[in-house]
Amino acid sequence: MPDISRRGVVAAATLPLLATAGAAQAQTTPTTERWGFHEITLKGPTESDGSNPFIDVSLKADFTDGKTVLTVPGFYDGDGTYKLRFSPPAEGHWRWLTKSNASALNAQSGTLTATAPTGKNHGPIEVVEGYHFAYADGTPYRQIGTTCYAWAQQSDALCAQTIETLKTSPYNKLRMCVFPNVGHEPIHPFVQTGTGDRDWDATRFNPEYFRIFDRRVQALYEIGVEADVIIFQPYDKKRGFSDMTRTQDERLVRYLIARLSAYRHVWWSAANEYDLIETKSMDDWDHILRLIQNEDPHQRLRSIHNIKRLYNNHKPWITHASVQNGSAILDDRTAETYRSVWEKPVIFDEVCYEGNIDARWGNLTGEQMVGAFWQGLIAGTYVGHSETYTPGNTGPDSSWLGKGGKLLGTSTPRLAFLKQIMEDGPAPGINPIDKWWERHLGGVEGQYYLRYFGTDAPAEWEVNVPKNGITGGEQFRVDIIDTWNMTITPVEGVFTLAKKDNYDFHDPKRPKIKLPKKKYIAVRLTRT
Amino acid sequence: MPDISRRGVVAAATLPLLATAGAAQAQTTPTTERWGFHEITLKGPTESDGSNPFIDVSLKADFTDGKTVLTVPGFYDGDGTYKLRFSPPAEGHWRWLTKSNASALNAQSGTLTATAPTGKNHGPIEVVEGYHFAYADGTPYRQIGTTCYAWAQQSDALCAQTIETLKTSPYNKLRMCVFPNVGHEPIHPFVQTGTGDRDWDATRFNPEYFRIFDRRVQALYEIGVEADVIIFQPYDKKRGFSDMTRTQDERLVRYLIARLSAYRHVWWSAANEYDLIETKSMDDWDHILRLIQNEDPHQRLRSIHNIKRLYNNHKPWITHASVQNGSAILDDRTAETYRSVWEKPVIFDEVCYEGNIDARWGNLTGEQMVGAFWQGLIAGTYVGHSETYTPGNTGPDSSWLGKGGKLLGTSTPRLAFLKQIMEDGPAPGINPIDKWWERHLGGVEGQYYLRYFGTDAPAEWEVNVPKNGITGGEQFRVDIIDTWNMTITPVEGVFTLAKKDNYDFHDPKRPKIKLPKKKYIAVRLTRT
């Protein structure tokens, strides 16, 4: 891992998965992979003449392959250094041309060859089939999220531990804040103008702060974990980074887009618990999200996360719903309602957390945490994890939720097991089957069914398959899955379906199967 | 009740609750109550000259009291008769002036005095406090709906029976179709051009058909039942009244607005199970609802009812959600999701029906039907009833759901009991308490709580009151309500609240109450 004290410009060489960074006056055409990361560094005005480059200098570049033109915003990285970051959406030859109000930065141009993606580069995540996600090359992406709000603002050592933990975990998306909500390293996002909490200059970012943030994002990039970047949050009321003016908010959003959107694994979360931020109206949130939609040349995923007031996720700038509702995933029926309402992918990013604190939002058992994922799965939705445990029971601020580090709970291995079930199942994902009829079945009609029993502990189950997609004669294998003990027990033989009644098909020779009378059991039917 | 064979123009004198009908050349200023029904009859072109008055003649009138101008569409009622129907939204002196492309109808004018409402005239239903309904004068309206799709197209005798049944029932809203979905009297909504199912002229309404429909609507008006008028439905595929062109749809919608919107108890339901109508797109539905929004001078409530695909009830022309989902009211948690999503009143107009048919949508027990209303209530939503029972078990087409008549089920008296509970409770209605935390509590914070246990049969309950709205020292009376046996049993004494923990208040001297270990129990807490 990089040392946090090393605060120079990050060199491309330190980023094995990133493509070669370009340079403005490159003699040969640089290359990067399609969906890779290409950085152009330019020299321009500094603060030394009394100006403020963050405000006074404009910079953007048009990138074109002759078919598409993408306008990429540049950003000031301090010390007279300006950068443009671009991720080519298509293979081929790209040309770029800058426009700036500073002559040193204006009318600069160059080229770039985007080569075929290799290795783990499957492209950015996109919404597919209405309710699911996949990498741009079609590789399925089964979201198993977690949250470490302020991990990025911790020491390099703790960040390294977080990355190591993630490497061996099932989590493939991490929610993380631009501004920390808990204790953090003493570096300020803005230039400080005094010692008071509000003594900072909203017109001057601290590039060092954001270079460190870049490195955290890059570290996730390298291990294949999506970075769900939370721009605003309501927790740091003292410093008030969420209480800026609209103009200041716009500047922050544009700066983040310029710095981060070229990373193919970045998602935008406009806010955490947006409705707790008293200084912003719904119109402000619409404005912020529309701004991201309009300005992000890479069109990363966009959402916003609530506490009590659901955002209208029908709005066209929302790519997927990011819901907090701890009760919605107590059964698939409730989870499913959001999906049918918004007709977009639904991620229950916060359903309370596994842990042992007094607060009711942070004391789920591992069983409850895992159960939420299964209920969400058969509802055709996705769920997020986190933990409030701390080694010395020192409270959630020092937990995985707050700072990352180590995982102490019991849910993680079961979520890895769940992820394997998902990966062994249909792509891009599971849809509710015969929704609104208490089937508690997810899958793909005619092909694959998962029945989850939650805290019920039935002794048997009638193997009834809803009629849609079935004509009779289909054969299915049946597995009994213990989602907590992580076992898969095949039921011997096959089930050959015949019409049972107006709604169901079954195998008349074996209409029921025995179940182990335990909680957290699922049954899987796979077409042979 | 009027005789169905009497098909002349309905005289105002037959409508005790309606205000005096005016006449174009009235010498004295006619009067009607505010929110009453004022009809102006004019004579104009007939079909005799070969023209089609439904298409060729335009007629509208501007009504003004000097503050507001309402443009009221006129309609052709056959035999050279044209009518304008107006319900004054405010007391005072109103003037009107017609505009028409027919000289006999153009530039006609008159006056009208709107007097104070009297008796049962509380005005039209409006949305209040975001999620509830009230009459325009502020009188609470607790929706207990039912459905008789094709009651209006039955014989006068059967219609009279339906009205008699409704009079002694709790139902205060009836969903009813403009075009019948089941067997009906042999009168056609349009002029027939042959004997085939599709041999009808979409450009020529049959005024007689709509005069009968008027009388059905009026009959509900007289007994104080709101008429939720369903314009399109997918069931009559042979005749295809839902398969018209956009121009023809627009003509129908305008005709219905002109005929019916002056009745203060009319609501508009653009369709039943809209998503089963294959000949219309979402854009068509938006267009139809926007048309109603723009053209209805009386701005009656507007909704649309789904089967599987939920309409986006965020859309501004929707006043309340009209949802079909039989599983959403199995618990308050799921019911509540729609409310929080759309931030509008939610009526579960179809949650399956009490009855005994094979089809799964029509075989709820009375207990299940009543349970749905209670779950909906504590979720802060509203529910609709109907029945599929028939005397000779002849199927749903001859049931209350299809044709009206008599109620045979067991839910109706329990819904009357429920309605009384609602009327004894807070106005305008009940909101979920501490939603998303599995409280299963509805009410008004600090004042009134209802806990419903559904099919649980607990022996006791911890009387914990969520902290919002409570500071300690409040006193509550507690009643145990048997929602099925319709008993209310007061718990002796009062409960004086003190802080219990971070989330709850309770009475430390009596933290629990005993319950009767029966299903369908509720507990009511009322502030003393």
Image (cartoon, coloured by chain):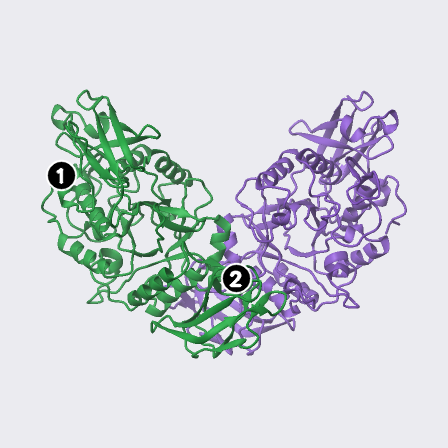
Chain colours: A green, B purple
A165 vs B299: above or below: below
Mark on residue B332?
Answer: 2
Mark on residue B240?
Answer: none
B143 vs B464: above or below: above
**Amino acid type, mark 1:** Val
Disc 1 to disc 2, how far (Cα)?
A: 55 Å
Residue at 21% from the left image edge and 50% from the top image edge: A222
Residue at 44% from the left image edge and 46% from the top image edge: A313
Label 2 packing within 10 angstroms: few (<14), some (14-19), many (20+): many
Percent x, y of residue B5: 90, 47
- Depth check: give the residue in front, B384 or A123: A123
Label 1 packing within 10 angstroms: few (<14), some (14-19), many (20+): few
Chain letter behind tag 2? B
B271 vs A288: above or below: below
Q: Does residue B497 appear left or right of residue B406 in this picture? A: left
Image quadrant assignment for residue B191: top right
**Is any atom of residue A60 visible in this view?**
no
Percent x, y of residue A447: 48, 61
- Tell me the element at label 1: loop
Percent x, y of residue A339: 47, 53
Chain letter behind tag 1? A
Nearer mark to the viewer, of 1 and 2: 1
Same chain, marks 1 and 2? no
Image quadrant assignment for residue A54: top left
**Amino acid type, mark 2:** Asp
Label 1 sits on residue:
A9
**Is any atom of residue A249 visible in this view?**
yes
B467 vs B153: above or below: below
Q: Does residue A9 appear left or right of residue B304 in this picture? A: left
Percent x, y of residue A263: 26, 42
- Tell me the element at label 2: helix
